[in-house]
Amino acid sequence: MTDTSNAHQLGFSRRSLLVMTASALPLAALPSFAQSDDNDIKQVKSSLFGDRKIQDGRVEVKLPPIAENGNSVALDISVDSPMTESDHVKQIVVLSPLNPEALVSRYTLTPANGKAAISARIRLAGSQTIEVIAEMSDGTLWRGKKPTLVTLAACVIG
């Protein structure tokens, strides 16, 4: 008896076709990538800053243009501030539109810091633009943004 099935014509035996199908089933059961969305970022901003206006400027964000691995991406932040008792940065907030949690990190500063600068490594769930907001002692909010291309994403959760 001659087997003229499509699988056989393509070089697959019935057994190998069944093994490939069974192997693919667990992949279909995996959850999709979790990520925050614009509503999550708006909610974080609202809970931290209320409805105060966020202005562009004073915050410099440095990320590599291409990050080979999203598990550890260098992030440098500096805020233009004299860091005196009457004029200083109170907090710096780092936000991500694609990570499972929109709030990546939050730093509290005082004039004793002497300089409004942070160097850290963060995890990124893919190519995106990171937003950094600095709250000043006078209540004003300043923002800086920086995009980065991530070739191997992190933050995959199940």
Image (cartoon, grey):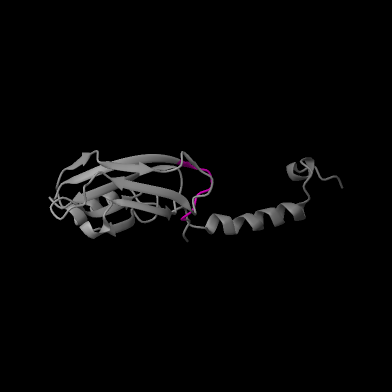
- Does 123 sit above or below residue 55? below
Report x, y in % for residue 54: 19, 43
Name of the residue lying farthest toward the right = 1
Q: Is residue 62 left or right of residue 84?
A: right
Membership of 99 in magenta stretch: no
Report x, y in % for residue 58: 25, 41
- Does 51 sit above or below residue 158? above
Q: Is residue 119 left or right of residue 71?
A: left
The magenta region covers 149-155
- Does 8 sit above or below residue 28? above
* Residue 97 can be seen, yes or no: no
Residue drawn 50% across the image and 49% down it: 153
- Does 108 sit above or below residue 152? below
In which quadrant of the rendered view does residue 90 lie?
Answer: bottom left
Q: Nearer the viewer, residue 27 or 79?
A: 79
Report x, y in % for residue 87: 15, 50
Q: Is residue 44 left or right of residue 129?
A: left
* Residue 20 can be seen, yes or no: yes
Residue drawn 46% across the image and 50% down it: 73
Report x, y in % for residue 22: 65, 58
Q: Nearer the viewer, residue 20 or 149?
A: 149
Q: Nearer the viewer, residue 135 or 103?
A: 135
Q: Main secondary structure of the magenta part?
A: loop
